[in-house]
Amino acid sequence: VRDVLFLEDVCSLVELQMGQISRFRGDIFNLGGGAANSLSLREGTALLEGKLGHRTGITVEESVRKGDLPIYFTDNRKGTKHLNWQPVVTLDQGFDKILAWIRANEDVLKKRYTG
């Protein structure tokens, strides 16, 4: 399980910070998608399968890789408190935007990655 942060939210955060740069100079924030925008690879695969209308086979590796964190999502409380910021792009909206971009650029992507 990982949290997801879409570019739109990153840009809004940077813009917010730049507008108050002297206030936050030297301060460190751990910001990301947070628990509300987290999903497992299985959930992400199911979400995309639903949007694309077809299934894909996935294999499950039973052994855990050394040092891999099975669950990680960012604790956004400090950013929410001090910056009054939180991600607004939902997983569903974010994946829709990614798929729309891929579809709009399909010809270029095919040439680049499939020859």
Image: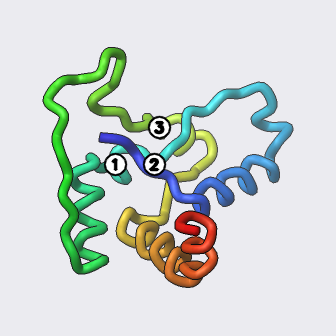
Q: Residue at x 63, y 46 (%)?
A: 83
When the figure is inspected, residue 43 is found, relative to residue 68, above or below; the finding is below
Considering depth in this image, is 104 or 27 the residue closer to the camera? 104
Q: Residue at x 79, y 37 (%)?
A: 23
Res 43 quadrant in image: bottom left
Q: Residue at x 29, y 57 (%)?
A: 44
Amino acid on which the number 2 mark rests in the picture: Gly
Res 113 quadrant in image: bottom right
Residue 75 lies, in percent from the top left, at: 43, 35
> SS for tag 3?
helix
Considering depth in this image, is 45 or 78 the residue closer to the camera? 45
Q: Which residue bears the numbered disc 2?
A: 33
> SS for tag 1?
strand
In terms of sequence position, does the residue under pointer 1 or pointer 3 come before the other?
1
Whole-number angstrom distance, CA of label 1 to CA of label 3: 16 Å
Residue 94 lies, in percent from the top left, at: 45, 67
Whole-number angstrom distance, CA of label 3 to CA of label 2: 11 Å
Q: Which residue bears the numbered disc 3?
A: 77
> SS for tag 2?
loop
Amino acid on which the number 1 mark rests in the picture: Ser
